[in-house]
Amino acid sequence: MKFNTYGLDIAKNVFHVFTITEDGEILKKKLSRTHLLKYFAKREPGLVGIEACGSSHHWARELIKLDYDVILMNAKHVKAYLKGNKNDFNDAEAIFDAVSQPNVRKVGIKTIEQQDIQLIHSLRQELVKRRTAMVNQIRGHLRERGIVIPVSINAFLKAMPEILENNDELLSQMSLSLFRQHYESMKLIDEQIKQRDKEIALLCKTDELSHRLSQVRGVGPMIATITAADLGKSRIYESGRQYAASLGLVPGQHSTGGKPHLLGISKRGNKYIRTLLIHGARAALIQ
């Protein structure tokens, strides 16, 4: 029998709980957002399983405050335990079955500080996408008017002031005005990216784990801080190879009949961290 174990399916406003009592009775409960913590506060603390998804880290931290043990699990691993059609109560039951397994694969519960670091990286990544889109758009329109700018952000920033000042014959007053507006908007985004870079560099100096990681060859503030935020103080990986596998940096495998067959890297897991690590490895090899 599994006592004091709960499968919790979370959503934005409605939550579903599945558990089995000491007498073997199956209990299913639908709760609103305001009643979720009140429900668990009245029950005997135990083990709660939750799929790792939006807001899961928040609810895990809140339940830990109520003396519960919380395990976050990858949704792909929970799916194997789903019985019948997909619905909220069946999802909660699948979570209950998954968290009850002795070899359940866990996802580390992130602290507020870890999520803050992830937030900085996420906002910076979005700013870089916006800057790249604006630069490519302006470069494409200028090429239509016979003006070519070399590829790279620095080349663009260096060339634009001269283009806007000395191309009255190729550019109309309307196009000059529009290009100036977009160029100024792009420079503002570029300044915001530089500000995010300064914040990341400062975090790398002040955070102990980030600072230690930055001492590794090929690892700079970007890689160090986002890796520290992803790992935290959790011990869910037994080795560095396990962590590399979770990021999709090791070969996939399709073996049968005792014959090993290795594929290319699996590319599962966090694409952003995997990309940064690959860039860092290339930089280390070039040095």
Image (tube, rainbow, N blue to C red):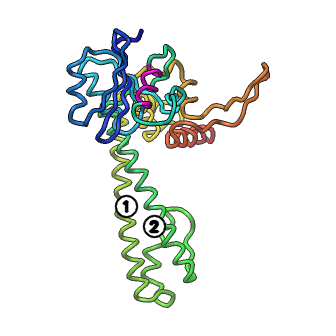
What residue did someone put label 2 on? 134
- Label 1, secondary structure: give it: helix
Residue 265 belongs to magenta span: no
Residue type at tag 2: Met
**Which is more toward the observer, 31 or 151?**
31
Residue 251: image location, x then y, percent:
67, 32
Q: Which mark is first along the chain, 1 or 2?
A: 2
Which segment did they paint magenta?
A: 90-99
Residue type at tag 1: Ile
**Which is more toward the observer, 132 or 65?**
65
Residue 96 belongs to magenta span: yes
Residue 18: image location, x then y, percent:
37, 24
What residue did someone put label 1 on? 189
Give the Cα separation between the discs numbered 2 and 1.
10 Å
Residue 130: image location, x then y, percent:
43, 60
Q: Residue at x 34, y 39 (%)?
A: 11
User: Is 18 located above or below residue 123 in the figure?
Assistant: above
Residue 86: image location, x then y, percent:
48, 36
- Label 2, secondary structure: give it: helix
User: Is 206 located above or below residue 156 in the figure?
Assistant: above
The quadrant in which the C terminus is found is top right
**Which is more toward the observer, 124 or 11?**
11
In-image side of 2 versus 277 (left or right): left
**Are dots 2 and 1 in contact, CB under 8 Å?**
yes
Query: Would you call the spot at circle 1 few (<14 residues within 10 Å), some (14-19), or many (20 or more)?
Result: some
Q: Looking at the rendered structure, which numbered label has been put on residue 33?
A: none
The quadrant in which the N terminus is found is top left
Q: Residue at x 51, y 67 (%)?
A: 136
Q: Residue at x 40, y 79 (%)?
A: 178
Query: Would you call the spot at circle 2 few (<14 residues within 10 Å), some (14-19), or many (20 or more)?
Result: some
